Amino acid sequence: MYVKDGTSELKRVLVSRPEYLKPAPINEIAKKWKDTTMDVEKMLQEHQAFVEAYEKAGVAVEFLDADEERPNSVFARDFGGCVKEGYILGTFKLEMRYKEHVDYEKRMADLGIPKIGEVTSGCFEGGDFMFMNEHWIAVGMADRTDAKGLAELKDILEPLGYEVTGVPLKREYLHLDMCFNLVDDHLAVAYKDGLPEEFLDRLKQEHIEIISVPEAAIFMHGCNLQALGNHRVLSLKHNALVNAELSKRGMDVIELDITEILKAGGGPHCMTFPLERI
């Protein structure tokens, strides 16, 4: 078994260091910083603290070496999605990320994790892949995953017994994990008004409580949290209100002091590709 669901105990992840990361204007956050030179030393320090937080929590960390030709590979989440049987390789919408597709596929082969399918005619990025429970996967459809990509995912996953639900979103939200994140079996952080009514109704049916944030929080990575399992979650230090609400509900919140990497448009969830959850 590789990844059981989105909230069981996280045992192993794949990440990549931000040695060549730049605020390319490919999302609403990075557009604000496009004329800025990012502090590489600070980003590397932030990423090392991120890795150490995983290791302290008992999570093994695997790496894809950084490469100047794929500066955004620090956002490891996006190349695909992982389930019990193996992983699905996605297709990036933007040409500047195509090399990630090739190099992450090779790294997964090196790690011995089987590819069970690939999205080829449509677009699918892992920031839209939300593993809601053992049998249900929600897939965001904002700027980077399209209807063809969703249809291909269904063709791959439904024969394995998974229900795959598309979640339409405003293009500006980029990925589902920017405006919604499941942090525990029955607890999520989200901008509720940005989610379709049908999806909200399903969340109620599944008894998933939502800690609600304003729309502005999307662009401050207020929803971009990483569940570790056993009621633990990685969050950002500046998410003070969200972190307080999580703590009230019995969550162990591990705060990361990351600010520089965020300028490129991704947070802890974006930087993590889960390899094993049990």
Image (spheres, rainbow, N blue to C red):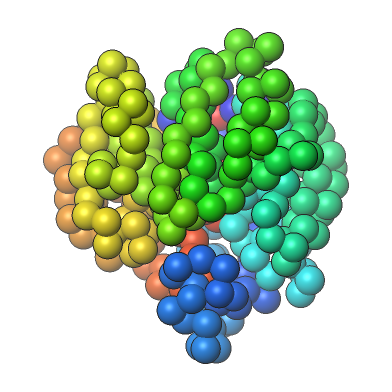
- Could you say where residue 209 lies in the image, as x and y percent from the top left? 23, 30
Whether residue 223 is visible to the viewer of this picture, yes or no, is yes
Q: In this view, does 48 lie above or below 13?
A: below
Q: Nearer the viewer, residue 67 or 257?
A: 67
Q: Nearer the viewer, residue 272 or 37?
A: 37
Q: Residue furthest left?
A: 248
Q: Nearer the viewer, residue 176 or 169?
A: 169
- Could you say where residue 119 lies in the image, as x and y percent from the top left? 74, 36
Quadrant containing the C terminus is top right
Q: In this view, does 19 lie above or below 35?
A: above
At a point 31% along the width and 18% down the height, the residue shown is: 206
Q: How many marks?
A: 0
Q: In which quarter of the image is residue 236?
A: bottom left
Q: Which of 192 and 61 is in front in this view?
A: 192
Q: In which quarter of the image is residue 246?
A: top left
At a point 25% along the width and 44% down the height, the residue shown is: 193
At a point 77% along the width and 39% down the height, the residue shown is: 121
Quadrant containing the N terminus is top right
- Could you say where residue 30 lies in the image, as x and y percent from the top left? 49, 73
In the image: residue 117, left or right of residue 185 = right
Whether residue 268 is visible to the viewer of this picture, yes or no, is no
In the image: residue 229, left or right of residue 12 = left
Q: Which residue lies furthest to the front in this view?
A: 147
Q: In this view, does 162 lie above or below 187?
A: above
At a point 66% along the width and 37% down the height, the residue shown is: 149
In the image: residue 41, left or right of residue 14 = left
Q: Quadrant of residue 221?
A: bottom left
